[in-house]
Amino acid sequence: MAFVNDITLGQYYPAVSFVHRLDPRTKLIAVINLMTGLLITFEPALLFGFLGLTILIVVCSRLPVALVLRNLRPFIWLFFLTILVHLFWTQGDVFFQVPIVKWTISKQGLSLGVIYAMRLALLIIIAAILTLSTSPIELTDALEKLMAPLNRIKVPVHEIVMMLTLSLRFIPTLLEEAQRLRNAQISRGATFDGSLVRRIKSLIPLLLPLFVSAFRRADDLALAMDSRCYAGGEGRTSFRQLQFRGADIVILSASFALLIGVVLYHTL
C-alpha cells in the first residue's frame, strides 16, 4: 500500500499562479475539452502536442512537477498491461517473435500500446492538475453553476454536487486512514509482502475497519450538518461569486478551438 501516499486526487495545493486564478468553471470545461480531444486522438504528432500543452499548464500552475507525476506511480502496472495487450494482440508487420511460445510482436502493436499508455498518463495528469489547482469549495460552486439548468426539471443539483464534492474531499482522509490502519497491523506482526495472492489476502483485514471508519465519518458529518441547520440548496447563496474574466474567455475559446481542430483533423 505504498501507492497510497502517491495519490493526490482530492488534495488542493495552494499557490499564486495563472491557473489557480482562473474561474473554476473555466477549468472544468477546459479539462473536459482536453480529455475529449485526447480520447479521440490516435496520431503521435497530436499526442506530443497534448504533451507539450500539459507541460505548459504545469508550468503556468506553479505546481511541483514531482507532486503531479506522483499520481502516475500507482498506475504503472496499467501502462505496462496496456502496452503488452497491444503488443501481442495487434496484427501488423512482425519485427520480433518470442521463442518457444511463437508469439509475434508487430510494429503497429507497439505503436498503439505506447499511444494508449501515453493517453492514459496524460488523462491522469490533467485530472490531477484540476484537483491540485482548484479547492473543493470552488469545484462545488462550479459544478452547481454549470448544472443549474437541471433545476428546472426538478433535479436536486445542489445535493448531487454536494455528495460528489464530499466524496472527492474525503479521498485523502480515507487514504490516510488506510495508511494508519496498515501501520497498526504491521505493529501487531502483520506482513504485506510476498506474492500477489498473499498481498491481496493481507488487505482483507484492512477493509472492515476502513469501512467502519468511513461510515462513522459520514455519520459525524451528517450530525454536524444537521446541527448547523443545513437544509439543502434552495435559497442558499455562495460566499464567492463566480465571474468570468478576460483570461477565462481566452482559455475557454482556446479549449473549444483545440477540440474542434482535433475533431476536424480526424474527420477530414
Image: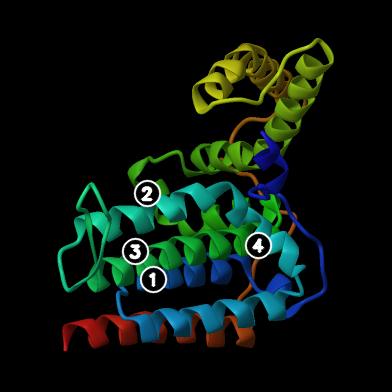
**From the viewer's perspective, is the residue at label 4 or at label 2 nearer?**
4
Q: Quadrant of residue 103?
A: bottom left
* Residue marked by disc 4: 69
**From the viewer's perspective, is the residue at label 3 or at label 2 nearer?**
3
Image coords of residue 128 (percent x, y): 61, 59
In the image, 78: left or right of 73?
A: left
SS class of the residue under badge 1? helix
* Residue marked by disc 1: 38
Mark 3 or mark 4, which is nearer the start of the sequence?
A: 4
The type of residue carrying mark 4 is: Leu
Label 4 – label 2 distance at C-alpha: 41 Å
**From the viewer's perspective, is the residue at label 4 or at label 1 nearer?**
4
In the image, 33: left or right of 53?
A: left
Image coords of residue 154 (percent x, y): 37, 40
* Residue marked by disc 2: 152
Label 1 – label 2 distance at C-alpha: 33 Å
Q: In percent of the image, x 65 and y 66: which residue is there?
A: 242
The type of residue carrying mark 1 is: Leu
Relative to 87, does residue 256 appear above or below in the rendering?
below
SS class of the residue under badge 3? helix
* Residue marked by disc 3: 113
Give yes or no for contact between labels 1 and 3 (Cβ–Cβ under 8 Å). Answer: no
**From the viewer's perspective, is the residue at label 4 or at label 3 nearer?**
3
In the image, 68: left or right of 197?
A: right
Mark 2 or mark 1, which is nearer the start of the sequence?
A: 1
**From the viewer's perspective, is the residue at label 1 or at label 2 nearer?**
1
